[in-house]
Amino acid sequence: MASQPLILCVGNPARGDDGVGPAVAKHLKEVKPDLEVTVCRGEAIELIDRWTGAERAIVVDAVLTGSEPGTLHVLDVTVHNLPVSSRTSSHSVGLAEAVELGRAMGRLPERLTVIGIEAAEIAPGTSLTPPVAEAVPTAAAWVLRELASA
């Protein structure tokens, strides 16, 4: 039997919508308390170190692509490249760069799914905007669907 996919929820709750990853992690733990979820800041080396050796990983993070705030973007990045524009400025190197660096180093999981939630505001000292907060349960449901298909 395959092990449970690694779930990484990325973000900084002190930077507005960049805190959506930790908000999804909290929601997942409320819905399924025994679920193992890791919250991290999303620095490239941290992400690569955490997913190295995993068969499957799911990363939840805020993204900035120009879509409506709260829009979910779900992408298997072992098959498709993650657009470089899908990063938040609170990370010194974005998730897309971490994925490509991991790919170049041969350190991606066999399957890596990114669930990106379109951010509106990532300023320090702000909280989740209403459309992003409303997307939290939907993003958590996507994570649970991904787990069910593992």
Image: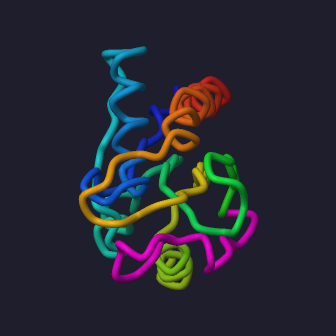
Residue 93 forms part of the magenta stretch: yes
Residue 146 vs 84, above or below: the answer is above
Identity of the residue drawn at 64% across and 27% down: 145
Identity of the residue drawn at 49% across and 51% down: 59
Tell me if 150 is positioned left or right of 23 in this view.
Answer: right
Q: Quadrant of residue 146?
A: top right
Could you say where residue 79 lies in the image, as x and y percent from the top left?
74, 63
On the question of residue 68 being in view, the answer is: yes
| Quarter of the figure with the C terminus | top right
Identity of the residue drawn at 53% across and 47% down: 56
What is the span of residues highlighted in magenta in the rendered image? 78-95
Could you say where residue 116 lies in the image, as x and y percent from the top left?
59, 53
Could you say where residue 11 lies in the image, as x and y percent from the top left?
35, 56
> Magenta span: helix, strand or loop, mainly?
loop
Colour mode of the rendering: rainbow
Closer to us: 127 or 7: 127
Could you say where residue 62 lies in the image, as x and y percent from the top left?
50, 57
Closer to us: 117 or 108: 117
